[in-house]
Image (cartoon, helix red, strand yellow):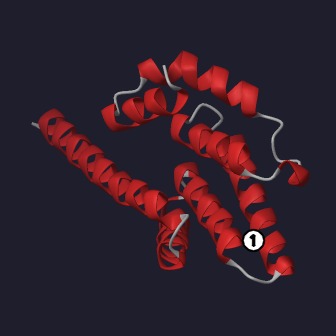
């Protein structure tokens, strides 16, 4: 009986985590064009990271900061947001270097960042890692997204 209860608890938490990621992924799609979505991404991921300390939420927080850099008008504020995002992204990957979603977020960010900022050193490694490892995830949405993004 205890095993069944534990199994149900794990399945329910996995389902909730998956639904939660769906919300984050929706904010990622709109955050680049909407300051409101970028702020929502920062607020939500900041709260979830503080509560769970899961690196995935720190990765989403980093992307939110990158989006805010895009929306900021003041050049100093742009750099501040960008540097915060960069620091958070690298910290997230240091905590969980095999996380496909965070590696994908870094890849997309580095490929879209202006070259003058120098945030492009891991593009080749991230592309190779994702191309090799994406098949091993059980997250079908993530698998499809990686496959489409890398044009595999």
Q: Give the percent coordinates (x, y) of residue 146.
A: 48, 32
Check disc 1 and report the residue beneath it: 81
In front of the other: 127 or 62: 127
SS at badge 1: helix
Q: Does residue 143 appear left or right of residue 41 in this picture?
A: left
Q: Residue at x 87, y 54 (%)?
A: 117
Whether 81 is drawn above or below 131: the answer is below
- Could you tell me residue 83's position as x and y percent? 81, 64
Q: Report whether 122 appears left or right of 58.
A: right
Q: Is residue 19 above or below residue 36?
A: above
Res 102 quadrant in image: top right
Q: Residue at x 15, y 42 (%)?
A: 5
Number of numbered labels in the structure image? 1
Residue 15 in the image: x percent, y percent?
Answer: 24, 47
**Residue placed at 62% from the left, 44% from the top?**
108
Left or right, 123 with reference to 19: right
Percent across and percent down for residue 110 are 73, 45
Residue neighbourhood size for the residue with mark 1, other residues' Cα within 10 Å, grouped as few (<14), some (14–19), many (≥20): many
Front residue (pair 102, 68): 68
- Identity of the residue furthest to the bottom in this view: 74
Q: Which quadrant, please, contains the N terminus? A: top left
Q: Tell me the quarter of the picture where residue 82 sits.
A: bottom right
What residue is drawn where x is 33% and y is 53%?
22
Q: Residue furthest top?
A: 132
């Amino acid at each position: 009986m205890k095993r069944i209860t534990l199994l149900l608890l794990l399945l329910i938490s996995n389902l909730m985590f998956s639904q939660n990621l769906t919300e984050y992924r929706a904010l990622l799609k709109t955050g680049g064009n909407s300051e409101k979505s970028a702020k929502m991404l920062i607020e939500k991921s900041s709260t979830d990271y503080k509560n769970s300390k899961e690196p995935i939420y720190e990765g989403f927080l980093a992307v939110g900061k990158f989006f805010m850099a895009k929306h900021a008008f003041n050049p100093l504020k742009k750099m501040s947001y960008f540097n915060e995002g960069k620091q958070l992204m690298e910290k997230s990957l240091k905590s969980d270097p095999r996380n496909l979603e965070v590696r994908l977020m870094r890849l997309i960010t580095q490929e879209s960042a202006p070259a003058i900022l120098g945030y492009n050193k891991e593009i080749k490694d991230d592309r190779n890692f994702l191309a090799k490892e994406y098949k091993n995830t059980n997250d079908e949405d993530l698998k499809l997204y990686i496959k489409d993004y890398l044009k595999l």
